[in-house]
Image (cartoon, helix red, strand yellow):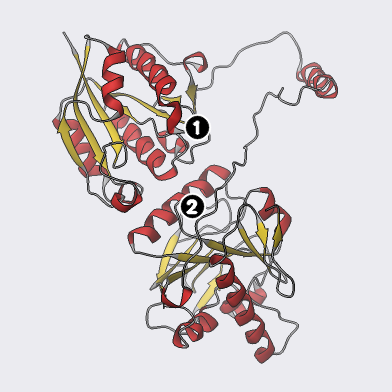
Amino acid sequence: MTARVVHYINQFFAGLGGEDTASVLPASREGAVGPGRKLQQLLGDDYEIVATVWCGDDHAAGPDVLPAIMDLVRAAEPHVVVTGPAFTSGRYGLACARVAAASAAAGLTVVACMHPDNPGLDEAGTAPVVASGEVARQMGPSLETLAAAVRKVAAGEPLAADDGRVGKIPRRNVTVDQTGAERAVALVLARLGGDREATEVPLPRFDQVTPAQPVDDVSTALVALVTEGALVPDANPDSLESARATRWLRYAVDGRDALPAGEYRSVHGGFSTVWANEDPHRILPLDVARQLEGEGVIGRLHGEYLVTAGNGTSVGNARRFGVEWAADLRRQGVQAALLTAT
Amino acid sequence: MERAGIPTALLCNLTSIAERVGAPRIVPTRGIPYPTGDPSLSAEAERAWRRRLVERGLEAVATAVHGPTIFPMDAAPHGEQ
C-alpha cells in the first residue's frame, strides 16, 4: 500500500512569487509541487505526495490561518505530513513548525525540515524536525535528509541526532563514568588546546542579519513605533509579564497624539520604571512622531504600537516575536520601524 | 524585521550588544530607563532631544547599510561597512 504524503510549502516554493505574494491565503493542489517533485522521486514508489498545501508567509506566521491550513492538510487524508524545507526563512519556518505541531497534536505522523538556526524551530514542540542546509541552493541534500526522515517516521521509528534531528529532542538520561568536575576540566583542557567547539551545552548562536533595503522616501512611508519597554495601559489588561515574556501585545495609537502619564505605564522588571511612568514618551515617542507626521516628515504613523518586555526574554521567544512582528507589520503595509529598547 | 524587509532603527543604550547580535541600524540613547528621554533636561529640552533621536532613527531607516551601523547624534554613522 502506498503511503499518502501531504507536503506543506510556502508561496515561493509553490511558484507563485516572492515577497509580493507573501499574503496569499492557504490553498492546495493534488500531487507534488516545486521541491515536492524531487522529494517524491527520492521517496520512491512506496510513497505518494497526494497533495501540496501552501500559504503566503505573512499569513502563515500570523495567528488565525492555522485551522484553514490544517483543514486542507486533513482533507487529503495523509499518512505522513511533511513541512519545508524552510532553510533560514523565519516566517516560513514558523509556519512549518506550527503545521508540524498541529499535525502531531492531531495524531498525524509528521516531520518538518529547516535550518537549526531557524527562528521558528521551537514552535514545533515535540514534533520531529530535521536539519536542512542554510540556503535554498542546498535543496538537494536537504531533501535527501528529509526523505530519509519521512521513511523512518512512516515506519514508526524515532528520529535521533544522527538522522539530522534538531530542536527539542526528548531528553534521555544516561550515566557516564566521569563526574561533572572531570568533564569540565576535560573541556577546559580541550579549549586551551585550541578546540573552540567542544561543549556539553550549545549556546545560542547569533546569526548574521542581512539589512533591509532603506526606505526610499520617509515622507511617504508608513512607519511603526514598536518597543520592548513593556509600555502598556495602566491596568495591564492583557497581563504582559515583567520578565521572561511569552507574549507580545498591540495597542492603538490611531487618533492619539500623546500617551499621558497615569494612562500608560511600563511593567518592565529590568529597570526602574519611575522615569517611564512620569512620561511614557520616554519609552514610546508618540508625541514627537505625531508631530513629525503632521509636518510631513513621516508619511503616516502606523495605527498601533507593538510591545513586549525585553527582560530575560529567551532567545527563542525573542526571535519568534521578531518574526511575528515582521509578518504583522508587513500584512499592514508598514515600511519601516523604530524600535525602542531599554 | 530587517530580514523581512522592514528597515528598523534600534534606539538603545547598550550599543555593543546591539552590534554583537547584528542589529543593522543602531541609534545610541542616553539611558536604559528612558530610551527616548533624558530626565536631566527640562521638559522642553527633553522633548527636543526626543525629536532629534526620532529624526536620527528615520535617517537610519532611509540609509543603506551593510552590517551593524551606529548612527550617533553628533557624528557620522560608523560600523564595519
A318 in relation to A33, above or below: below
- Determine the secondary structure under disc 1: loop
A68 in relation to A245, above or below: above
x%, y% of residue A68?
20, 44
Q: Is residue A102 left or right of residue A279?
A: left
To which chain does the residue with label 1 belong? Answer: A
Q: Is residue A208 left or right of residue A247?
A: right
Task: Identify the amino acid type marked 2.
Answer: Gly
Task: Identify the amino acid type marked 1.
Answer: Glu
Q: Quadrant of residue A279?
A: bottom right
- Earlier in the chain: of badge 2 and badge 1, it is 1
Between A35 and A23, the one nearer to me in the picture: A35
Q: Quadrant of the N terminus of chain A?
A: top left
Q: Which residue is mark 2?
A: A322
To which chain does the residue with label 2 belong? Answer: A
- Determine the secondary structure under disc 2: helix
Q: Residues within 10 Å of mark 2 (few under 14, many from 20)?
A: some
Q: Which residue is mark 1?
A: A134
Q: Residue at x 28, y 52 (%)?
A: A23
